Amino acid sequence: MLNKLKTFIKLHLPKIDLIQCWKQFVQDVFKMPLSLMSHPISGFDDFKREKTFKGYVAIFYLVMMIFTQVIAYNANGFLVNKNNPKDFNLLFSIALVIFPVVIAVIANWATTALMDGKGTMTDIFRVITYSFFPYVWLGLLATIISNFITADEVIFFTFFQSAGAILMVYMMFFGLLGIHEYGLFKTIMMLVFTIVAVAFLLFIMLLFLSLIQQMWAFVSSIYQEFVMRFL
């Protein structure tokens, strides 16, 4: 019976080459984003036209961005960490990454739809999440060294964090330029309008939340009045 089971598995289940899977993972997760960072114009052109992106890599870096923020909050060295571990909230940390990404994707898509942009919402999401590549790894490196530096060496921690943020913006800029097929000036204008759209969306959301809060207070006051009078 056992021999028949082994034979069935060999014949019907596909063989998984772990070494090949690992090589593909390294190619997709490390080499591809590094290539985009070093050759942004041609890289992001292929990113869209040749479909060199991978959906799972976009999700991977979104999760890694959350992981980086969580680690930084709790594991940065005492010289640079002013956070109170008791105030840590995992859901808030997750929302602090996902919410800006969602708002940025919607705002950029709405803006570029009026400016003849060629990128879809999926393209925008992938550009933004791929752009997390330098921030994630330099941020984790900064967290590690923050536990071994002295007060005079805090500049190294600041350098790695700043470099990660600058490279992230750099990749995002050229990524959006590439997928929307804009020139330099139009890309700058698109980013300005995107920021305005983000501010508008946040204003609408705050207005909506304020309206919901007032409606809840009104319904609650009516309910309390009913309870006091009739119950």
Image (cartoon, rainbow, N blue to C red):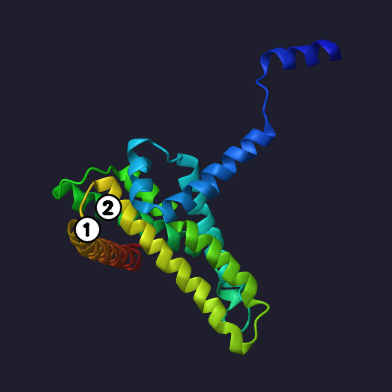
Q: CA distance from mark 2 to mark 1?
A: 7 Å
Quadrant for residue 144, please give it: bottom right
Residue at numbered disc 2: 177
**Crowdedness of circle 2 by 10 Å Cα count: few (<14), some, many (20+)?**
many
Q: In the figure, is residue 151 to the left or right of 59? A: right
Q: In the figure, is residue 32 to the left or right of 153? A: left
Q: Residue at x 49, y 45 (%)?
A: 57
**Crowdedness of circle 1 by 10 Å Cα count: few (<14), some, many (20+)?**
few
| Circle 2: element type | helix
- Asked whether the viewer can see residue 83, the reply is no
Viewer-closest of 166 and 73: 166
Please determine whether, in this image, residue 215 is positioned above or below residue 183. below
Quadrant for residue 154, please give it: bottom right
- Asked whether the viewer can see residue 199, the reply is yes
Q: Earlier in the sequence, mark 2 or mark 1?
A: 2
Q: Residue at x 80, y 16 (%)?
A: 6
In the rendered structure, find residue 48 and report the number of the disc placed on it: none
Q: Residue at x 43, y 41 (%)?
A: 53
Screen quadrant of the N terminus: top right
Check whether the beta carbons of the residues at disc 2 and disc 1 lie within 8 A of each other: yes
Residue 130 x %, y %: 43, 51
| Circle 1: element type | helix
In the rendered structure, find residue 184 and report the number of the disc placed on it: 1
Q: Residue at x 46, y 40 (%)?
A: 54
Residue 187 x %, y %: 22, 57
Three-letter code for the amino acid on which mark 1 is drawn: Leu
Residue 165 x %, y %: 43, 67
Task: Give the total number of marks visible in the rendering.
Answer: 2
Please determine whether, in this image, residue 121 is positioned above or below residue 223. above
Residue 199 x %, y %: 24, 65
Three-letter code for the amino acid on which mark 2 is drawn: Leu
